[in-house]
Amino acid sequence: MTTMHGNHKVTDALMPYLQDPRLVRELAYINGQWVHGQGDLPVFNPATEDVIGHVPRLNGEQATQAVDAAQAAFQGWRSLLADERAALLLRWHDLILEHREDLATLMVLEQGKPLADARGEIDYGASFVRWFAEEGRRAGGDTIPGHIPGARLLTLREPVGVAALITPWNFPHAMITRKAAAALAMGCTLVIKPASETPFSALALAELAERAGFAPGVINVLTGSGAELGQALCRDNRVRALSFTGSTAVGKRLLAASADTVKKCALELGGNAPFIVLPDMEVKAAARAAVAAKFQTAGQDCLAANRILVPRAHYEEFLDAFAGEMARLRVGNGLEAGVTMGPLIHRQAVNNAHTLVDDALAQGARLFAGSRRPGPGPRFFLPVLLADVTPAMRVFREENFCPVAAVLPYDSHHDLLPLANNTEYGLAAYVFGQDQRLIWSLLDGLEFGMVAVNSVKMTGHCIPFGGIKHSGLGREGSRHGFDDFSNIKYACLGGL
Ligand SMILES: NC(=O)c1ccc[n+]([C@@H]2O[C@H](COP(=O)([O-])OP(=O)(O)OC[C@H]3O[C@@H](n4cnc5c(N)ncnc54)[C@H](O)[C@@H]3O)[C@@H](O)[C@H]2O)c1
Ligand SMILES: N[C@@H](CC=O)C(=O)O
């Protein structure tokens, strides 16, 4: 059922939750128009499995129409002064924060994370919009001390043109703004394809961008099958940059599909973070940090501590402390006060979690704490602590992306780098301890794009976020965030 708000159809399932129901858009956004598709896709609340709304299933032809619109808008957008683009971005930023509560509530309803985490993501996502609005004012080129008599040498930093952004469901707001803000500030125009599980966060961003005054075609949002729409965007030669955040498997397919059109490809892919506890680390503090690093976003986080390495001398003590901290987690509907861990995104994710635990137990792991009983709904998985994990187990080799903690002992610090680096992934790693010599030895030897020492919090608008190996290409945020959306043009002015 729906209710009209002006010319705005809003699903009744969401009405009671929002101050501004017009933020809910059940249509895709192309060239400043809200459009239907070839049928509709349901959007589910993962905590209750209620259908909270529908979005259109667009086809490849409509993806091409979106690229048409972005291409048509590009010259006008890039020709604005950096200050003019910045003003629009800051207006968008302000509108996002003005609607923080509604955006966070909408995120809980479609993604499931606790409301406090959703509010945090809105703040995190908005911080990229402000950051790149300001950085865009300083994104110039260089002059070069020359080697050619009578010539002056310089570089110009130029927007690539139309950028396609394909984003995941686990951070349905911030993974869009982290890309979109950099691309827009640089002068690119956008075609955004959010995850089908969480389209409303993306469409609400488009609604607020429209209110901020972005011209038609500058920002376009497609809804529908990732495979169909993604392929259309990859094949389109006018799309000059593809920025993808998602699984390594899909990222590899998109990289291959972009080869024929030689696009700039930025890939933010999966992780398999080691969490290293050094022998001089206070055990209870290490356990508290490890629980926070493991169960953030119910483990559905690219930065989640996937493998926890503990010195054998403190092993059982750590397991007890970890179990005690894990027991404090409150699993439930993200809208309920006090809930600290929500559901997984779909039933398949729950099945995957059980399969990982079964595989580990079959190979000798210990179920040290936690329960295999059902949670408060079909998409819930209660936290589990596995001890005596080995590199032979899937829970060690794969990105778990669920609330299953995998802990293993080590005997010597010489074991740490071989264990930590024993993965195809290379996104993030954690080290907790005081021995500076050992910390620096690990910092030098860890094959990861980001290393956090004595801190679970590592991410933010000002840091170069990204991985190496099979965790991706490129960096988002920081001053490096423009690289994936710009080209450097060299100019040699001779005969002077
Ligand atoms: N490195 C990072 O910054 C980062 C951040 C968040 C999530 N992730 C990773 O994302 C993964 C979880 O997100 P997910 O389940 O949405 O990933 P996913 O790869 O299944 O989907 C990501 C996006 O790609 C689209 N997609 C799916 N198949 C496609 C195809 N064949 N062609 C084009 N597009 C396609 C989806 O619709 C979605 O929009 C995890 O591996 C996680 O580690 C990484
Ligand atoms: N937590 C990550 C998102 C990955 O899942 C971030 O902060 O970017």
Image (cartoon, rainbow, N blue to C red):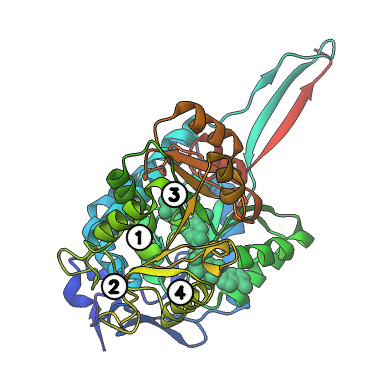
Residue type at the position of mark 4 = Val
Sequence-wise first label, 4 or 1? 1
Q: Residue 309: where, in percent of width, then height? A: 47, 51
Sequence-wise first label, 4 or 3? 3
Q: Residue 87 carries which label?
A: none
Q: In which quarter of the image is ligand 2?
A: bottom left
Work out whether residue 369 or residue 160 is closer to the camera in this orientation and state it: 369
Whether residue 307 appears in this view of the structure is no
Residue type at the position of mark 3 = Arg
Is 453 rendered above or below residue 148? below
Residue type at the position of mark 1 = Phe
The answer to which image quadrant residue 286 occupies is: top left
Work out whether residue 179 or residue 425 is closer to the camera in this orientation and state it: 425
Q: Does dot 2 land on a helix, a strand or a loop?
A: helix
Q: Residue 175: where, in percent of width, then height? A: 45, 56
Sequence-wise first label, 2 or 1? 2
The answer to which image quadrant residue 153 occupies is: top right
Q: Which mark is residue 312?
A: 3
Q: Mark 1 points at which residue?
A: 295
Left or right: 455 with respect to 3? right
Q: Does dot 1 land on a helix, a strand or a loop?
A: helix
Q: Name the residue under label 2.
A: 109
Q: Name the residue under label 4.
A: 357
Question: CA separation, marks 3 and 1?
Answer: 23 Å
Is 426 rendered above or below residue 50? above
Question: CA separation, marks 4 and 1?
Answer: 16 Å
Residue at the far front: name it. Answer: 313
Left or right: 152 with respect to 300? right
